[in-house]
Image (tube, grey):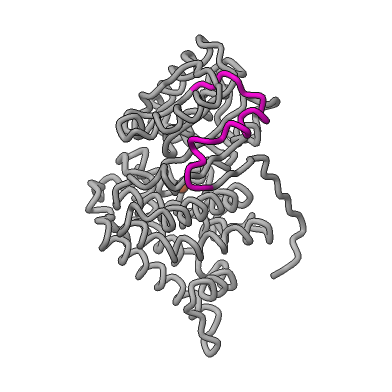
Amino acid sequence: MDLPEFAMFFQPTIIIFGKGVASDFSNELSELKIARPFIVADKVIRELGLLDYVLKGLTSGGFEIAGIFDEVPQDSSTSVVVKIAKAFTETNADAFVAIGGGSVIDSAKGANIIAKMGGDLVKDYSGSGILTKHLFPLVVIPTTAGTGSEVTNAAVIYDEESKTKLEFIDRFITPDLAVLDPNMTKTLPPKVTAFSGIDALTHAIEAFVDIDATTFSDMFAKEAISIITSHLENACKNGDDLEERGWMSIGATLAGIAFSHSECGIVHGIAHALGAVNRVPHGIANAIILTYGMEYNLEARPEKFDELSKILGVYDKHLSILENGKRAIEKIKEFEERVSKVSGLPLKLRDVGVKKEDFALIKEKALQDGTVIYNPREVTGDGVLEILNEAF
Ligand SMILES: [Fe+2]
């Protein structure tokens, strides 16, 4: 590997991991000077008893719950974020505690921006590096192992007006505390486990091959790829196995650190477009596009794909760099098929309601997506269409 010309590592999130920590993290809250947390969650989290599990710990730790917003939909949007911010402000709370998957966490990040800064979320803050000061403390308790949002400086929120998924990238929205408890993910159905896990794997692989990858991000990406490919299939098969769940939580968090220090690329660019145009769930879109995106990038960074073959245990010293890279992609294909078999994860666009006549709009949105500029190979309209056709 070449010595980087420039590299930066910044991870302000305190991460705690353990079976049971989601109902016992009072010490960390006190250290953050939090007294009146406001909870953001969704109905499913409440129905599964996960909200009560966390609330019990908070109340027995002497914290006063300032308010609860548990109506975040599966695919949140800017109007929901505005509602959360308003509810937060009315309760005089001093911190956000987000309990849920990517939609809940990213909504809390967006609400934190408006609650602290005021103004219009889309007009004033969408984009990168716009915020100028610290927000309210944000604690995140993920209930999926996938988005990595518990440690990232990014939020992706659907804007109803432009019908686009907008990115908010800023170091001030990075959570202050991430609480990783395998008990919080054990009730996830196999299919959700699968697509969340493949989302995390996509973060790690894209972070690993992107133009912004450094030795710091690689360290996290490589470990995440190794952990996720070793544990996702079993986590789908044996949902209540806390060992498998625990490893997946750690893998997804490491992948989150990796891509927030590198970036995502063409796979996420197309996945965001599929989310906006066809409302394909993010992880499913990534699962469908991942290996075609890897094939698109292979010749741009063959040495990275060669290294990937070592991580995945398919490296053959008699083969060329390019051939080993192809073996790595084949291994990921096989892995996805195994995961699909035990979870029902769809791996083709035609199986998730996408039509060929949607391709032109998907292409247009993918080319506008902020992630594609970090892709190791220039992303062209023809390239996107080629991938969509292969993935159909
Ligand atoms: Fe993602």
Query: Where is 324 relative to 114, above or below?
Result: below
Question: Is any part of residue 139 visible from this angle?
Answer: yes
Residue 178 percent across, percent down from the top left: 56, 40
Kindly indicate the quadrant of the structure image that contains residue 162.
Answer: top left
Residue 169 percent across, percent down from the top left: 59, 37
Question: Is any part of residue 380 visible from this angle?
Answer: no
- Side of 117 where 205 appears, left or right: left
Foreground: 199 or 366? 199
Residue 373 percent across, percent down from the top left: 56, 49
- Toward the bottom, the furthest residue is 318
Q: Is residue 33 magenta?
A: yes
Query: Where is 251 relative to 306, above or below?
Result: above
Image quarter hosting the N terminus: bottom right
Foreground: 247 or 103? 247
Task: Give the total number of marks visible in the rendering.
Answer: 0
Q: Residue at x 40, y 24 (%)?
A: 161
Q: Residue at x 64, y 41 (%)?
A: 14
Q: Residue at x 36, y 62 (%)?
A: 234
- Toward the front, the furthest residue is 60
Query: Where is 305 relative to 152, above or below?
Result: below
The residue segment tinted magenta is 18-38
Query: Where is 16 relative to 322, above or below?
Result: above
Q: Is residue 178 magenta?
A: no
Image quarter hosting the C terminus: bottom left
- Toward the top, the furthest residue is 90
Residue 254 percent across, percent down from the top left: 56, 53
